[in-house]
Amino acid sequence: FQTVRGLSPHRAAIAKLRGSMKKSDIIEKQFNRAFWGYDIVEVDQFLDEIVKELEHMEQENKLLELRNQMLLDRMARDGVSLSEEDKK
């Protein structure tokens, strides 16, 4: 496993997923069992919490994108334009 920018393999995997992770990635994730491993129920409960938070963030992001577009539309109607720097 090649590291990304000197990150550990675990953190490199997270960096590669950033922005592309979906709820299904979390729900379908399987972990190997180990004798001294984690409590499966506790891990499942935590993953459920992550899925709920991701759903909430996705909804909030869609709402903010819609609000942003509405404001841009209103600005365009009112003849207000953004500088190139503001568009970034």
Image (cartoon, helix red, strand yellow):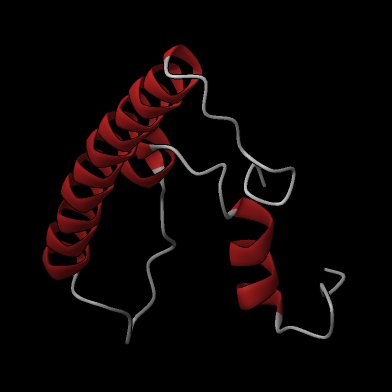
Q: Is residue 34 above or below residue 18?
A: below
Q: Is residue 63 above or below residue 10?
A: above
- In depth, the one of 54 and 46 nearer the eye is 54
Give the residue at x 49% y 44%.
Answer: 21
* For residue 23, side relative to residue 18 (left or right): left
Q: Is residue 65 above or below residue 53?
A: above
- In depth, the one of 78 and 22 nearer the eye is 78
Q: How many marks?
A: 0
Q: Quadrant of residue 70?
A: top left
Q: Quadrant of residue 65?
A: top left
Give the residue at x 24% y 56%.
Answer: 50
Give the residue at x 69% y 57%.
Answer: 16
Where's residue 42, x and y in %?
13, 69
Q: Is residue 80 above or below residue 64?
A: above
Where's residue 25, x and y in %?
44, 40
Where's residue 81, x and y in %?
59, 30
- In depth, the one of 15 and 45 nearer the eye is 15
- Check the image and name the residue furthest to the front: 79
Quarter holding the N terminus is bottom right
- In depth, the one of 68 and 26 nearer the eye is 68
Where's residue 85, x and y in %?
71, 51
